[in-house]
Amino acid sequence: MTSPLSRTALLAALLPLAAAAFAQTPPTEFPPDAQAVTVDSVKALAGKKFVGKRADGKTWTMDFGADDYYRLSFDGGILDGKVRVDGARLCQDMRKSVESSCNDVRLKDNALYYKRNSNGEVVTLVAQ
């Protein structure tokens, strides 16, 4: 017979394993029918705001303004600057950042799919 203390210890040991088994892997692929960004599609984003949540629970808000203005608001800060299209990638030239970065971005209906360079996660942001 197992003592209550042994059962508690066993449950405490198994709980993190069960949580890891049920944790979802963030998506790394775009929806098959999502379209790559173009100069025209990025211009059409002017005046729109997109909101989404990364797999780690952090919320992103992307605002696109006139004259290629771009602002990314996130838990802990704001980055802003200009966007441009390089091939099929969306590039962000941020004012307070040393470097520009370019990301694979796709559009479909009212959603923007942004692939993070750091881990390959595709973050879904929905137009508000």
Image (tube, rainbow, N blue to C red):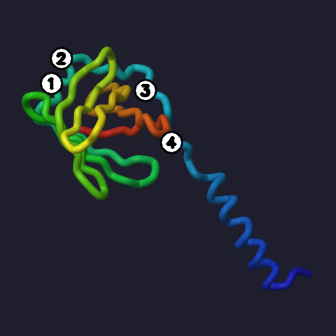
The residue to which callout 2 is attached is 40
* Mark found first going from the N terminus, 4 or 1: 4
How far apart are the two marked residues, 2 and 4, measured between alpha carbons?
29 Å
Q: Amino acid at mark 4?
A: Pro
Counting residues from the start of the chain, the first of labels 3 and 4 encountered is 4
Q: Element type at marker 4?
A: loop
Q: Report which quarter residue 80 is drawn in.
A: top left
How far is disc 3 from disc 4 in space, using C-alphas?
Answer: 13 Å
Mark 1 touches mark 2? (CB < 8 Å): yes
Residue 52 is left or right of residue 18, and the answer is left
Q: Residue 31 bears which disc, if any?
A: 3
Q: CA distance from mark 3 to mark 1?
A: 21 Å
Closer to the eye: label 3 or 2: 2
Q: Earlier in the sequence, mark 2 or mark 4?
A: 4
Side of 40 relative to 122 (left or right): left
Q: Which residue is mark 4?
A: 26
Residue at left offset 26%, top offset 41%: 97
Q: Is residue 128 visible?
A: no
Q: Residues within 10 Å of mark 2 (few under 14, many from 20)?
A: few
Q: Secondary structure at mark 3?
A: loop
Residue 103 place in picture, x, y as percent: 36, 29
Instruction: Point out residue 54 in the picture as x, y percentages from the top left corner.
Output: 40, 47
* Residue appearing at x 67%, y 59% in the figure: 18
How much space separates mark 1 and mark 2, taking CA atoms? 6 Å
> Which residue is identified by label 1?
44
> Of marks 3 and 2, which one's residue comes earlier in the chain?
3
